[in-house]
Amino acid sequence: MNASKLDFLLRTQLPLIVFVIIASFVLTYFISRPERDGVGYTPDQPIQFSHLLHAGQMKIDCKYCHTTVDKTRFASVPSVSTCMNCHSIARKDRPQIIKLTEYYNNNIPLPWKRIHKVPEYAYFNHSVHVNKGIECSTCHGSVEQMEKVGQVNSFTMGSCLSCHREAHDRFPQLKDQINKGPEYCSACHR
């Protein structure tokens, strides 16, 4: 290759290659940011709901409110009617319950703010994990001790792979019931 061709390639191609590399890094960084930065996210909800009271003190099972968690890939957010199963009788005079009742009477769904979210490009199935005996607290933390729920664990690919690889160490009581989770790309990236 002569010097003029090499000079041409270095002046035109190299900057383009460097630009593509930097742009790929920057895009990947910002697209995956919610996945990395979700820990600590604890939004105010439209109705103050205490998991400490309901799941902790009253020991209401997660599946009572999150009805699809053992049937589908989604845990489902409780509808107002689920809340009203108890609150049409219990604590009806409390300000938050009065507010809840207004949503119910006006047939308006509660605009809960989502806290835990797996990125759109990743597939996760709650029912597979729950039906194998993996507790909700494994990913969501000790929700029964939280007055206000927030994200306590990272939902990164590294976190999931670490759990899949160490399944028998993390869940010795389930050693006979679970295999190590899949590690091939198409298990989660569908």
Image (cartoon, grey):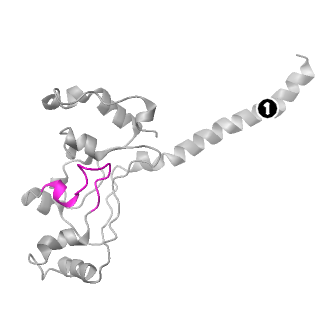
Classify residue 47 by image quadrant. bottom left
Q: Is residue 27 left or right of residue 112?
A: right
- Residue 18 spot, x, y in % from top left: 70, 34
Given the image, on which type of amino acid does mark 1 rest?
Gln
When asked about the image quadrant of residue 145, the answer is: bottom left
In the depicted structure, whether residue 55 falls above or below residue 85: above
Which stretch appears magenta? 61-77
Q: Position of residue 157 (x, y in %)?
A: 40, 37
The residue sitting at the top extreme is 1
Question: Is residue 7 on the magenta stretch?
Answer: no
Name the residue carrying label 1: 13
In the image, residue 85 sits, relative to residue 144, either above or below, namely below
Front-lying residue, 119 or 36? 119
Q: Vertical placement of 148 versus 17: above or below?
A: below
Residue 116 lies left or right of residue 98; in this view the side is right
The residue that appears at 8% across and 56% down in the rendered structure is 59
Residue at point 21%, 80% (across, down): 101
Residue at point 25%, 29% (across, down)? 167
Q: In which quarter of the image is residue 10?
A: top right
Residue 25, image x and y in percent? 59, 39
- Report the predominant secondary structure element of the magenta stretch: loop
Q: Where is residue 77 in the image (x, y as percent from the top left)?
A: 28, 61
